[in-house]
Image (cartoon, rainbow, N blue to C red):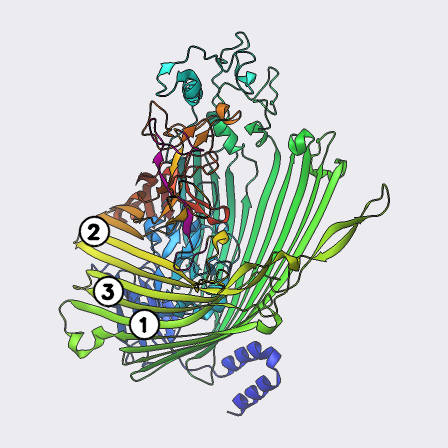
Amino acid sequence: MERKSHCFKRIKGNLVLFPLLLLFCMAVNAQEEITVTGKVTDELDGPLPGASVIEKGTTNGTSTDFDGKYTLRVSGPDAVLLISYIGYGTQEIPLNGMTVANTQMEPNASNLDEVVLVGYGSQKRSDVTGAVASANLEAFEESPNTNIGQSLQGTVPGLNVGQVNSAGSTPEITIRGQVSLNGSQSVLIVLDGIQYNGSLSSINPNDIESIDVLKDVSSTAVYGAQAANGVILITSKGGKRNQKPRISVSSSYATLQPTVSNRPLRRAEYIDHINMQLYDLRFLAPDYTTPNPDYVSYFEPGQGINANFELQSDTNPGEFSENDYDWWGEGTQTGFVQQNEVSIAGASESTSYLISLGLTEQEGIINNDDFSRRSIRVNLDTDVSKGWKVGIQTFGSFVKQDGDEPFLSQLRNFSPLLVPYDEEGNLIPNPAGTIESNPFLGQNTQDYERKDYFFANIYSEVDLPFVKGLTYRVNFGNNYRIEKRYGSSIYGAGLTGDAGKDIRFYRDYTLDNLLNYNRIFGKHDVSATLLYGAIERKDERTNAYSSGFDRLSLGYNDLSVGAIPIISSSAFTETLNYQMLRANYKFDNRYILTGTIRRDGFSGFAANEKTAYFPSGALGWIASNENFLKDSDWVDNLKIRASYGIAGNQTGRYTSLARLGTRAAYVFGDGGGPAFGQELTSLANPNLRWEKTAGLNVGVDFSLFANRLNGSVDAYKNITDDLLFSVRIPYLTGFSNIQTNVGKIQNTGLEVTLNGDIVRNDNFTWSATANYATNKNKILALTGEDADGDGVEDDLIQSGLFIGESINAIYDYEVDGIYQIGDDIPDGYGIGNYRVVDQNGDGLITQADDRKIIGTRDPSYAVSLLNTFKYKNLSFSFFLNSIQGKDGHYISRNDNALYRNANTLYQNVVSGIDYWSPQNPDGLNAMAPNRPGIAGTRYENRSFVRLQDVNLRYSFGQEVLEKIGLAELSIFISGKNLATWTDWNGFDPEYQDSSNNVYGVGLSVGGRPVLKGYSMGLNVSF
């Protein structure tokens, strides 16, 4: 006792050494423990490797080995074990002095007893009061996905993941729609407990154990302002305690090709296309069916407007060239994905480890669209002594994306009558005789692009001896990233040659101190988490560029040879600190209360508003544990929950400050050089506040009919206030905008998940999962100004923002078909032009009076269905994903209108575009000799149903494995994006890139198709 007292005196006097002294105190005051062994089996008495064995009321636990056996040291003979395994009901075993505890698990389709991450900890799903969902990664682990984001598409209601159409790219990810105007739109990624700011393309999908999604404000509140747009918690794999070393090898190969095969027109189609555009010259008005006897071919010497003689035959002037060059075919290829993984995992009673190596090679369908990732991961944790555990999760990822692609738009619009090379085999810089460059100039470069990612989370966790159930954990996470982009081109800078080097270093650290308390007192289950943490991020970048080279033999390695050097550099540092307290209370396994308060500080906000508080609370009622439902024949689990809280959002760094810029301000004397000075480029806002979102979520989790049907339903309403927005101000101030807080947004939605255990017998099972989600947002207020004095707050028309409408409302001219021969056509328009609706009926089409809200980019709902069939050792699954829009929802611009001029007349187009002409009056796209001042544009609905994933796998049985000395052997074939049913005319309706305002890929120049793939591979363990 005296020794213990002396220990705490040392702690009090040495706060700097607090974590180390706590470890010392723990070792001094270790408690008596006993060792329990046992075996966990399935309903057929087969071993269950990887089953979770946890001492109830603690974080002390282990996993069963390959033979289903486990060994665990527990606090004493009265401990209670919780044994769980995916697909089986959790078993609760009081030891009552036993040292051997075997158990046979019973199948259970309910997932309410699974352990899920909730941010800075984990909980049984039955105890979760917020909207937390787990992704089904197992169903898509054999799909040809190079990015873990691709495995999340459509799998979690409320989680919106876009498509990818280039090698190694990351899809756009959002959770529960858009809740901000100019604030951060990024979902927070937490990797092994540490915020991760690197690209998801750096993470090997094969290293991921689980992904949990925090959707409502209550569950995200533990991350405060970092989590305004939801949180994705990623947990990497590790060794299982008491597991013999296991080496696993997997290898797969997939082909890639466009989901839609539209190609540019070849020679004959292209000539017909040119002639179609000249209908008003080749034929006589008014019906344009009678040939014009005075028509002279545009290709006769001296005829036509700016006639392009590059398209003429060399031997027959006035005739088309006989060339039929396939620009698209020469600039594209059959893509592939090749993935090879090897890992070794194992554990003793006190130490577990995993080491993995991965190599992913991908080539897209465009030449030089290449992606290569080499990765290494080491995860290790060990019990240093009783009650003290340390560990590390670390990985390195080395991404190579060398090579520049040909210019995609030129590949599509260059005439097949032109060729890229002269007779000596040299590239012709401008084959069309215009400013348009040869598309192969884009790939004829020296390009070096590398990204090296380094991540580590080192932690130590200790059971504090002076309070039972109290643990202290420290996490130190570090991200480091090096990006190098070097390039040179003899065709750059107006064919004078250019070269450059761009190098960037990014690093951050996260330090979290966590106190966790977890105890059970009879019917009272109490837990709490106290957090104090800090984050610092640093970035520096240097760019050196030169142009005007006599020769480029050294490329980017000697920029001093260039005639015009340009050097730039930048750097930033930003810091955050935060404190959080979360408390959970459960009474009699029926009533649950959760409360959280988080305080955030961020250097980017104004001096008066550096910090903010974000509280939340949640209630849960496990109704199935009430007496009136305990003996129900059809209700197995039923939990009702509700939560309310406030989350924040951050501004960009420096936005509250007056910033300086450098410019050439004055030239002294004749022939003098410019003197560089500094000037203010933005106004300061000393009261720039945190954007805040108040959210209400009501949900139900259930399991029915002997656990054959389970799922959840969530309804939510979020209101975001003090929106971060750049407001226009009178230019007489010397500035055009200022960052400030304005307006209010409402966000509502409904999410449903249903899991069905439809058929289950000894040889055959059929299970299905269906998801449904809808989300609607509405602007409630903006600046509060009423400039026209009509008593109604003004919309921000120039910004496309309207009170009472969606953030993504589309404000444009309404189009009602195309003017046909014989129509009454107003001045300024002609046949072949879009019929723009005159909204006020004054006979004129004007910007002020004839635009309207014609719809929104937001979908009406998203729905998906996963079916999995297993017959003995054979399994088959298919996944359907769909997004639907009705009544003007989920529309986007998809207009390929063609207005003839000297340039467009000779440009090629993609096959499949349906143009209007006198011979095709039902054509979708306008085609006319002249473009009206207000031409209008055509929008299309993006609704689709996609056969997104198909997998077929055969796993060899135990008898075969024993004969060949393997622990596991399976072979598989799979397909990705095999079919899409949609009325959208284009390469893909789903793809979107909000940073470039691209929503759906049409057939216009530059569109890139989404890829489909067929893959085959094998998995081996021994």
Report x, y in % for residue 393. Answer: 50, 60
Q: Which residue is situated farthest in the front direction here?
A: 842
How far apart in space, not on screen, are marks 3 and 1 (Cα)?
32 Å
Q: Amino acid at mark 3?
A: Met
Disc sitting over residue 227 in the figure: none
Q: Nearer the viewer, mark 3 or mark 1?
A: 1
- Extent of the magenta region: 801-830
Residue positioned 17% across, 74% down in the render: 629
Q: Which numbered disc flags the more N-terminal residue, 3 or 2?
A: 3
Q: Is residue 809 magenta?
A: yes
Report x, y in % for residue 439. Answer: 55, 29
Q: Which residue is mark 3?
A: 105
Residue 41 in sight: no
Q: Nearer the viewer, mark 3 or mark 2?
A: 2
Looking at the picture, tell me which residue is in the foreground, 242 or 470. Answer: 470
Disc sitting over residue 642 in the figure: 1
**Relative side of 685 to 958, left or right:** right
Circle 3 crowding by C-alpha within 10 Å: few under 14, some 14–19, many from 20:
many
Circle 2 SS class: strand
Q: Cβ–Cβ below 8 Å for labels 1 and 2? A: no
How far apart in space, not on screen, are marks 3 and 2 (Cα)?
20 Å
How far apart in space, not on screen, are marks 1 and 2 (Cα)?
33 Å
Q: Amino acid at mark 2?
A: Trp
Residue positioned 58% across, 86% down in the render: 12
Looking at the picture, tell me which residue is in the foreground, 600 or 33. Answer: 600
Q: Amino acid at mark 1?
A: Ala
Magenta stretch: dominant SS? loop
Up-down relation of residue 969 to residue 292 (above or below): below
Report x, y in % for residue 789. Answer: 47, 63
